Image (cartoon, rainbow, N blue to C red):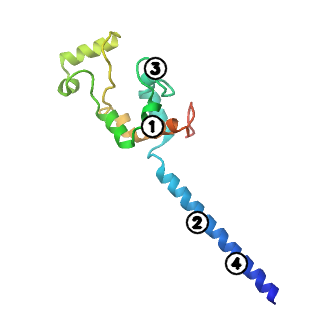
Amino acid sequence: MSKLWVWVLVAVFGLTGCAVEFENTQAAREIAEAAKPPGSVYTGWRVYQDKCAGCHGAEASGSVNAPDLLLRVRDLGAQRFVSLVLQRYDWGLPAAQAKAQTPAREALIEDILQRKDTPIAMPAWGDEPRVNAHILDVYAYLSARSEGTQGVGRPAP
């Protein structure tokens, strides 16, 4: 009878150890998930390709017209990224002129279209519905690219 009790105790402690391991693994996964930036990497990639890749390059590594976003996103948190993308209006014009339909704004846009030597800064995207609605998705995509958890090309949906 004592051998039977020993086997029962070994089985009980063995199963208890498995349950603790399962709980610890689950907690670790939840912590890792909570540490990820909010948003969908796939949706962010789609919006990025549509609205940002023309200037920053298809892989966000920069171009002649715009900087490498992978280097910049590493130093930005989600809040700062959203602020820069949605509210930046630095086109070399005062804020009121940059947002209003003024002759100075129209002249600047014409210079940009003709590729004159006008300094170009990224426009505000706050009035663009798709960017506005998916700004955290774009941040998730760029964060994943900058951290190396998302390679080049299309992410899995």
Name the residue type under label 4.
Answer: Val
Residue that numbered label 3 is attached to: 63
In the rendered structure, are the residues bearing label 2 and label 3 in contact, judged by CB atoms less than 8 Å apart?
no
Which disc is residue 23 wearing?
2
In the rendered structure, are the residues bearing label 4 and label 3 in contact, judged by CB atoms less than 8 Å apart?
no
Report helix, strand or loop for mark 4: helix
Name the front one of labels 1 and 4: 1
Mark 1 and mark 3 lie on one chain; the one further toward the N terminus is 3
Quadrant (top left, top right, bottom left, bottom right) of the C terminus: top right
Name the residue type under label 3.
Answer: Ser
In this view, the residue farthest toward the bottom is 1
- For the residues labelled 4 and 3, the Cα–Cα distance comes to 62 Å
Residue at 71% x, 73% y is 14
- For the residues labelled 2 and 4, the Cα–Cα distance comes to 17 Å
**Which percent across, then down, holds residue 102?**
18, 19
Horizontal relation, residue 3 to residue 133: left or right: right
